[in-house]
Amino acid sequence: MGTPTNSAEKRFAGIGVSPGIVTGKIFIYGKNELPVSHRKISAGEAPAEIARLEQALMATRQQLQEIQRRIARELGEGDAAVFDAHLLVLDDPSVIDEVVKRVQKEGQNVEFAFDSVANQYIKSLSAEKDEYLRERAADIKDVAHRVVRNLQGHHFQDLRSLTEPCIVLSYDLAPSDTAVIDKKKVIGFGTDIGSKTSHTAIMARAMDIPAVVGLHDASQQVESGAMALLDGYSGTLIIHPNDQTLYEYGQIETKRHQIEVSLESLRDVPAETTDQCRVILGANIEMPGDVPEVIANGADGVGLFRSEYIFINRDSVPTEEEQFRAYFEVAEKLHPRPVVIRTLDVGGDKFLSHLQIAEEMNPFLGWRAIRFCLERVDIFRTQLRAILRASKLRNVRLMYPMISGVNELKKANAELEVVRRELRDQKIDFDEHMPVGTMIEVPSAALTADILAKECNFFSIGTNDLIAYALAVDRVNEKVAYLYEPTHPAIVRLIHQVVEAAHRANIRVSVCGEMAGDVALAPLLLGLGVDELSTSPSLVPQLKKVIRSMSKSQAVEVARDALTFGSGEEIRRVSTKLAMSIAPDVMELSGS
Ligand code: PEP
Ligand code: MG
């Protein structure tokens, strides 16, 4: 536990999205800018201003080259090449000459002049049709931001360049920010906005980093360097924790640790109810690097590999070979356990600049996932080839995200058939019987599950999106987070309907959204007939304990009651009551 200071303790309440308690120094990370100072300078001051500009350009160049070297070392030359374009901006005479002119002729201070010139370029380039020119706008924005910070004496740091462990606090973190986090340096993080099912929160759970979102304006109120305690269970950020708080948290941590240790003994036993109903308990992963966590937590395999994360933080689409290596690595390390690879689910809050998806008014309802893939069949077929090639290990399954109707599913299957034929012609080995599944995350898919079941081998219910779409609640907007209710009767009925349709067609159903990791709801989901659950690796032991402590008939009773209730609270209550009575220690650990 950390050292208290003399400053008064201050608490911020948010939403706990990744469990764990950490103490450390705060690092404020923000792309939201400090105001750029503006003052009139005399002609005599101009040479000194221009000298400051030269120094700032030099400092920026050194910082960029340092980042470039580190990325080349850690991620390879391809990723590092992005910074070549950034370095070029620093030598761009059209920008520099204009800044010098404004300083000399118009008496503008240099940071103001630089900021205005850069903004002018950014504005006109952003409006261009040409993709290359639009990308130049993004380069100029990034570099101008660094130059201005250097001119203003603010040291620029990104999340890859942290030198000591800290708790990162930010207005928001994009999945691309989270994806580069070094767990040794970022021991926890908090954001002003966000919700439990935003992809940043999902990443935090996958990486096992305690995190709290929806902290309102905490990043504005707290300074870098302040001592803090972050409680990812209850969703609290405490700045300058006092002795009493640190003592209390120390006690809680010891108790939680004891429960966690007791769960370790479950690693190699199956998730089976007391009346011998076997539940398959998968883990959700984003990267091949997550596999050790899957094994360490005793999961039965991977129920959802969000493949889009291997497309993120790079400046081009990964080649077939790069993708094949990633899929094969996961399947090989987990063999013979099954690995469900979901095809590219880009869009929504997962934005990839190199895929040229224009900004949309409603990205979650827009050109996303399978809709994107069915149009960019070049990208889709490359991915399908890579997945099929990895299927030669015979433990790979594939599923499509965001299917909204049977035509889409048939089209996706037709693409898969084209690729299968190609591989057969080329005598490349793959699993002819690789199971193909459909994610059920759009209400129209849930309502037509009986039709979809005829065209695929399994269903996986993506409750994160299904809840958002069915209840019309933006999954990343903390203002409407209170309406985001997994136990809403509409959701329970939809899940029930999907399970019934699937079982009538003799196919299995998994739930791979965050609802699957909510231990209090395990009785409800199993009672509704869900065959498999897939969640963050770290939640697997808790879920296993709950499943092993109850009988399927108890769960069925919970679900039967739930289907008669009119409110989400009642439904949650009945499921929580059973979970609490059979596994109180796990419920305490989960903060339920
Ligand atoms: C879901 O929507 O529940 C899901 C698992 O997919 P994602 O969270 O990646 O959108
Ligand atoms: Mg989804």
Image: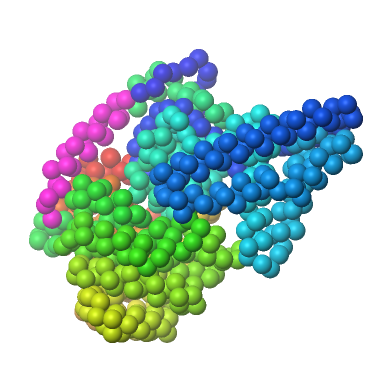
**Residue at position x 34%, y 73% in the image:** 385
- Give x and y (percent) for residue 187: 39, 35
Quadrant of res 584 = top left
442 vs 142: above or below: below
Quadrant of res 458 = bottom left
Quarter containing the C terminus: top left
**Residue at position x 50%, y 77% in the image:** 375
Quarter containing the N terminus: top left
Range of the magenta residues?
Answer: 250-270
| Image position of 138 (left or right of 102) | left
**Residue at position x 61%, y 39% in the image:** 61
- Give x and y (percent) for residue 420: 30, 81
- Give x and y (percent) for residue 554: 18, 59
Farthest residue toward the top? 6
Query: Which of these two is toward me, 96 or 361?
Result: 96
Secondary structure, magenta segment, majority class: helix
Query: Which of these two is toward me, 366 or 470?
Result: 366
**Is residue 201 in the magenta section?**
no
| Image position of 83 (left or right of 196) | right
The answer to whether residue 323 shows anywhere in this view is: yes
- Give x and y (percent) for residue 281: 22, 58
**Is residue 258 in the magenta section?**
yes
